[in-house]
Image: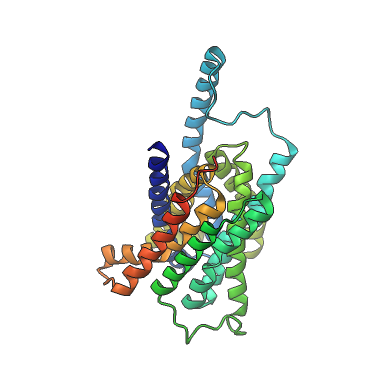
Amino acid sequence: MLTWRRKLVDVGLLVLVNAMWAGQYAAYKTATDAMGPITVSVITFLFATIALIPFLLHERRRSSAQDHLASQSKASLSFPRREGWSRQDITGFIVVGVLGLMPASAFLAWGTMRSTASNAALIYLTIPILTALLAAMILGEKMTGARWLSIVVALCGVLILSDIDWRRLNLASGRYLFANVLILLACLSSSFYNVYSKRLLRRFTPLEVLVFGYSIAVVISLPLLIWVEPLTMAQIRGYTAATWFSVMILSVFSWGIAMVLWMFLLKRLDVSQASVSVYLLPFLGVLIASLTLGERITLTMLIGGLMTLAGTILVTMSEASPA
């Protein structure tokens, strides 16, 4: 009973995480109308770090109190115990910052500005597949029949749901090729970040992985920002309330709360399991638009959305938790 209850919680959290991620595309679009993609990424990671630091400090205080109690009662610890930072730890965070965080954010913002919505939607469907392949290569996760079946079911559902204009779809067109490559690299970077973070979670808490990773991403991006997109006070004063609101959505929800929950789930699930839920994004985006903008949900959209949800439930409920 407890195992099934835990799995139901995992499914609910996966839906909640993807609901918060669903708003990032509109937020990126609004923000990049006024800011460059590197500027959006740097400010987003900076604000997300600032928002998460109080929670990290609270976690540290809890960890210290727990260490004290554990030393007296010989109880087991809920937080990873470390004896200082190793060179491998430092290298790991630099790797996720350089190869994971910045490309995943900046390339996605840059690519969606230059490509079509149909191209971007189709390329984004590669994330669970790329994640599964990287998880097998880096973490040694096994792709079971249930996992491949869940990917197929969810992929079919999202293709039914997605309003992709197949006539305008031209991934190899010279006009959109560069932008499509950027989006694909963003998907690959996002998959790599998810997989490599699983390794970091063996020694660090989810909040530590996020705050340390975001901080390094900001530091390594500042020279690029100064070189490619130097900011002036006139530019900053020209940003509208909608621009700042979009950045806050990205910082607090997409890269903040949603990522904290996502890291928590990665400690409980294999990366290839959790990544199938990414296919919920289009359906949740449509559902949010229906609730907020009054857009109509058709029967086809509903069928596609239920199939993506079925794929997420299948991969989460059909296997024992690895943690």
User: In which quarter of the view is residue 164 placed?
Assistant: bottom left
Location of residue 207 in the rendering, given as x and y in whole percent from the top left corner: 52, 40
The residue sitting at 39% across, 65% down in the picture is: 307
The residue sitting at 68% across, 55% down in the picture is: 137
Location of residue 181 in the rendering, given as x and y in whole percent from the top left corner: 62, 73
Location of residue 316 in the rendering, given as x and y in whole percent from the top left corner: 46, 51
The residue sitting at 27% across, 63% down in the picture is: 292
User: In which quarter of the view is residue 2 placed?
Assistant: top left
Lateral position of residue 92 relative to residue 255, left or right: right
Residue 103 appearing in the image: no
The residue sitting at 69% across, 34% down in the picture is: 85
Residue found farthest to the left: 294
Lateral position of residue 41 relative to residue 1, left or right: right
User: In which quarter of the view is residue 250 placed?
Assistant: bottom left
Q: Nearer the viewer, residue 129 or 47?
A: 129
Q: Nearer the viewer, residue 192 or 95?
A: 192
